[in-house]
């Protein structure tokens, strides 16, 4: 037999038999370790997949919240008149060919330009002829409405139509009007059709539009109405005009031939709209749709949509969510892995005598490792298979990284083998101890230098990780993956902190020993005598420190996101409620007049904003001009608890020289200081410059209007102007210049929401006024599936890490119970009571618990602040000003409570076991 074969046989012979026999002897400990491993693998595999599933749900929600902005709008290149399934159907077929998946219902619409008409009461309104066709069910296009009054429009008799033989007759088209619009305009068809004249010449009207019936949409939210909301109800006029409303005239498919007699196909604006299917769409499918949209838009120029912008903003938000989720996932995995190392050390400690005997009989360290691997590999493989099967069954179709779970499994396989080899090596070593004292001192110095070098390496890695994360900021990672560098930073910093505590602990224990020496009891000296070993044990201290650090870090991030979301709601709403839109029309003016006197409304401030206003002359500076009711706005902000600029309430007091008091943003004021202006500083207002008197600075930002709810709300606003200028409306009016009409208003007071609700304002599409409440926007933003999933993950992570803290201390107590039992058993023969034994155990573990709590708490509070830019807080809070970390106490309290509970459980378990020992057995047999 060759030498290699002999060595192989000596190394592996009996490995299966020895492994099976030892597993049977320690079945309880192995079962507990297996359960811990199973739980760790389930979390490591399931958490990334849960984040991935939440990302799918959140992506669909982002597209839905974007509304019509995410729809695909295509130009048919022709008219639907006379042939509704002609160019429109061809365009729909082209869309279906270019986008085989991802699109929902498609519809076509055609409309004339607007023109003025007279209502029965004498008021005037804008109107236009319009056609809508749901292309997915074109045969039932007229099934969109229900006729509730009059008769359904029908083709006009041929002898009444204009033509070469009857040029004196105007064209006629029978049309319908929505019942809601008819009520607003006072139109009835009870006594006959309502006739609208379109165009007028010397001979009379060019065409007659005969409203024969009133209808109600069967589904006002149907996608067919998205391009033409005026067919559902009156809508505000967007152009500057004295006429307030626009009401459409609906042309059914059956009378399209009549429409061709009064308009030319070239005068119709025709579009085909396709919605995005969000019923069961995944994020990957939406990404594929985005790529197709960009390609088709670039090559054909026929498709327009904001879908890429919506998905890009969502991707940025998803990157931020995954970055924070990776901290929790890696933290749980790292703490669980350290617990597995402690369990492996406990197993090796129980077998120390057997390993020493094997080593004494000539067993090599390789053979010890092989026998340990034979025992652990099958257990880990079976456990991993069970974990994978459970995750695949519970979360089918979801994707996520397996790297974290593989690392945990590797620790579970290698830790028992490495620790067993270490225990066997410690039993006998070939290293000879020199007899010379100087040589022994030199050897000790070399060992110390090696240890210090390793510790310094950990510190350097921790610092490098933090610096790298700070420099690179937030970066995307693969689908379902975690950011390894960001996730490793807290663990590395916690490891460095644990090493610092290990270095400081002996001095602290020594100081405690000097105090304990003065005590009269036995508990304090005994606890201090044993505390030195617990305080310098790196692995337990590292596990406690990492767990505490991640508990505090997760809690800090949860609180920071929640606080940031409230700050974002304060910034975007600016009060308890805000109104945006056509407040200069009858409906808006009536609301602004009624709300100040409503019950529960403390203050109301209206305002308007103009961008691109020239500041000074020849300076090249522009500003955003915010014209507000200054005193009322100051009161609204004060009622809400928002910061109020000094001097804001006094802007209404005009200067005697005719200048307008103003507040200017600090950045603009610095630019103006660099370019002194001779005479008065002037700011352009509706084309006419006004002299302003700068009375101070403002911390307010340009108001972007009604805040959106999709991920684009968190995108930093594009800075187009050099700053903000705030002036009072009345002070500006006193100068005689034209003042912009109000287009926004802020309300405060406990009854503000109820007062606006009582006005019963129509929806924004009909009224032109968007109502946003502070609490409503905050609930909608915080209720986003991605944010809710992340916050749930972090809160659950706090609980899991707290349980791992308890498990860590229990494992430490169990691992040291044999040595401590020997000491306590000996002292019992000298009269040691149970209370003193408990106090000694608590004192022994105190440095470990206190050191881990202090180091972990500091790391958990400092690391988020150090890596703020890599956490993407603005994308989760909705505050475009940037994220800020909010330090809080409650995560530290949770960690401290978990440590106290762990100490109580560990001491209680050990006391219960020691209570069975009888003093006679101790005197006769000795230690246990």
Image: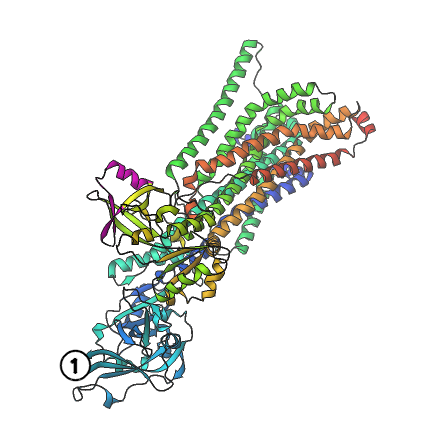
Q: Which of 735 and 722 lies nearest the eye of the viewer?
A: 735
Q: Position of residue 495 (x, y in %)?
A: 51, 31
Q: Which of 823 and 777 lies nearest the eye of the viewer?
A: 777
Q: Position of residue 844 (x, y in %)?
A: 66, 28
Task: Give the labeled residue for mark 1.
Answer: 202
Q: Which of 796 and 779 lies nearest the eye of the viewer?
A: 779
Magenta stretch encompasses residue 674: yes
In the figure, residue 165 lies in which quadrant? bottom left
Q: Position of residue 329 (x, y in %)?
A: 51, 44
Q: Position of residue 658 (x, y in %)?
A: 27, 47
In the figure, residue 366 lies in which quadrant? top right
Q: Is residue 392 above or below residue 329?
A: below
The quarter of the picture where the C terminus appears is top right
Q: Is residue 592 left or right of residue 378?
A: left
Q: Is residue 114 above or below residue 771?
A: below
Label 1, secondary structure: give it: loop
Measuring 44% from the left and 63% from the top, which residue is drawn there? 279
Q: Which of 587 and 904 lies nearest the eye of the viewer?
A: 587
Q: Is residue 59 above or below residue 193?
A: above
Asked whether residue 104 appears in the rendered view, the answer is: no
Q: Residue furthest toward the bottom?
A: 159
Asked whether residue 694 appears in the rendered view, the answer is: yes
Q: Residue furthest toward the front?
A: 656
**Magenta region:** 666-691
Magenta stretch encompasses residue 747: no
Measuring 25% from the left and 71% from the top, which residue is drawn there? 113
Quick one: label 1, few (<14), some, or many (20+) residues within 10 Å? few
Q: Is residue 398 above or below residue 429?
A: below
In the figure, residue 204 lies in which quadrant? bottom left
Q: How many marks?
A: 1
The quarter of the picture where the N terminus appears is top right
Q: Residue furthest toward the right?
A: 920
């Amino acid at each position: 037999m060759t030498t290699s074969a002999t060595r192989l046989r000596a190394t592996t012979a009996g490995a299966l038999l020895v492994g099976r026999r030892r597993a049977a002897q320690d079945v309880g400990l192995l079962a507990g370790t297996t359960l811990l491993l199973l739980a760790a693998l389930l979390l490591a595999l399931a958490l990334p997949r849960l984040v991935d599933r939440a990302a799918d749900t959140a992506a669909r929600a982002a597209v839905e919240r974007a509304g019509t902005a995410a729809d695909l709008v295509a130009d048919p290149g022709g008219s639907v008149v006379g042939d509704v399934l002609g160019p429109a159907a061809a365009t729909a077929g082209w869309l279906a060919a270019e986008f085989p998946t991802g699109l929902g219902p498609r519809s076509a619409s055609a409309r004339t330009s607007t023109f003025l008409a007279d209502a029965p009461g004498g008021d005037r309104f804008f109107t236009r002829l319009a056609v809508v066709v749901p292309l997915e069910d074109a045969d039932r296009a007229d099934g969109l409405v229900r006729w509730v009054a009059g008769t359904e429009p029908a083709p006009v008799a041929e002898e009444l139509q204009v033509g070469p033989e009857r040029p004196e007759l105007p064209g006629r088209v029978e049309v319908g009007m929505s019942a809601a619009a008819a009520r607003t305009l006072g139109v009835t068809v009870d006594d006959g059709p309502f006739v609208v004249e379109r165009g007028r010449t010397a001979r009379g009207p060019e065409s007659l539009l005969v409203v024969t019936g009133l209808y109600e949409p069967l589904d006002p939210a149907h996608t067919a109405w998205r391009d033409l909301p005026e067919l559902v109800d009156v809508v505000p006029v967007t152009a500057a005009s004295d006429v307030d409303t626009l009401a459409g005239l609906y042309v059914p498919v059956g009378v399209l031939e009549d429409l061709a007699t009064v308009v030319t196909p070239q005068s119709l604006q025709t579009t085909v709209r396709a919605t995005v299917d969000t019923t069961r769409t995944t994020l990957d499918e939406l990404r594929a749709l985005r790529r197709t949209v960009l390609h088709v838009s670039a090559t054909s120029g026929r498709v327009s949509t904001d879908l890429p912008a919506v998905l890009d903003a969502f991707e940025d938000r998803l990157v931020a969510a995954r970055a924070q989720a990776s901290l929790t996932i890696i933290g749980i995995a790292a703490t669980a892995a350290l617990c597995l190392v402690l369990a492996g050390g406990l197993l090796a400690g129980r077998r120390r005598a057997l390993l020493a005997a094997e080593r004494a009989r000539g067993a090599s360290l390789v053979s010890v490792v092989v026998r340990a691997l034979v025992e652990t590999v099958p257990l880990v493989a079976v456990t991993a298979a069970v974990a994978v099967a459970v995750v695949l069954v519970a979360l089918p179709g979801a994707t996520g990284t397996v790297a974290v779970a593989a690392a945990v499994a590797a620790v579970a396989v290698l830790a028992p083998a490495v620790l067993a080899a270490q225990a066997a090596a410690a039993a006998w070593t070939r290293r000879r101890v020199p007899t010379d004292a100087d040589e022994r001192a030199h050897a000790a110095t070399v060992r110390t230098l090696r240890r210090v070098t390793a510790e310094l390496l950990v510190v350097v890695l921790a610092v490098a990780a933090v610096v790298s994360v700070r420099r690179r900021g937030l970066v995307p990672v693969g689908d379902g993956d975690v950011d390894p560098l960001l996730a490793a930073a807290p663990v590395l910093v916690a490891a460095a902190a644990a090493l610092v505590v290990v270095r400081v602990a002996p001095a602290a224990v020594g100081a405690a020993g000097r105090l304990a020496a003065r005590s009269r009891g036995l508990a304090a000296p005994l606890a201090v005598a044993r505390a030195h070993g617990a305080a310098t044990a790196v692995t337990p201290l590292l596990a406690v420190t990492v767990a505490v650090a991640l508990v505090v870090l997760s809690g800090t991030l949860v609180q920071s996101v929640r606080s940031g979301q409230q700050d974002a709601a304060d910034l975007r709403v600016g009060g308890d409620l805000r109104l945006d839109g056509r407040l200069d029309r009858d409906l808006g003016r009536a609301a602004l007049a009624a709300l100040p006197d409503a019950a529960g409304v403390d203050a109301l401030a209206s305002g308007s904003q103009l961008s691109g206003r020239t500041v000074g002359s020849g300076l090249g500076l522009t500003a955003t001009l915010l014209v507000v009711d200054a005193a009322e706005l100051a009161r609204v902000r004060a009622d809400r608890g928002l910061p109020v600029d000094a001097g804001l309430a006094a802007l209404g007091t005009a200067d005697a020289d005719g200048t307008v008091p103003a507040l200017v943003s600090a950045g603009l004021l610095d630019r103006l200081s660099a370019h002194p202006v001779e005479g008065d500083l002037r700011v352009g207002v509706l084309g006419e410059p006004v002299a302003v008197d700068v009375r101070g600075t403002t911390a307010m930002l340009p108001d972007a209007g009604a805040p959106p709810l999709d991920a684009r709300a968190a995108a930093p606003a594009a800075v187009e102007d050099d700053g903000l200028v705030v002036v009072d409306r009345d002070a500006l009016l006193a100068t005689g210049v034209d003042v912009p009409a109000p287009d926004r208003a802020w309300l405060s007071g406990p009854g503000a929401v109820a007062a606006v609700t009582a006005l019963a304002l129509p929806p924004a599409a009909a009224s032109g006024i968007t109502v946003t409440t502070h609490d409503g926007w905050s609930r909608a933003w915080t209720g986003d599936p991605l944010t809710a999933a992340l916050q749930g993950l972090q809160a659950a992570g706090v609980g899991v890490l707290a349980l791992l803290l308890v498990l860590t201390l229990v494992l430490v107590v169990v691992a040291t119970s044999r040595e401590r039992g020997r000491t306590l058993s000996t002292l019992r023969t000298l009269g040691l009571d149970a209370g003193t034994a408990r106090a000694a155990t608590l004192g022994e573990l105190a440095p470990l618990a206190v050191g881990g709590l202090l180091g972990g708490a500091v790391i958990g509070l400092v690391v988020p602040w150090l890596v703020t830019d890599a956490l993407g807080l603005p994308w989760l809070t909705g505050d475009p000003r940037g994220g800020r970390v909010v330090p809080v106490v409650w995560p530290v309290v949770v960690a401290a409570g978990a440590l106290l509970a762990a100490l109580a459980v560990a001491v209680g378990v050990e006391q219960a076991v020691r209570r069975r020992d009888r003093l006679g057995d101790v005197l006769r047999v000795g230690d246990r």
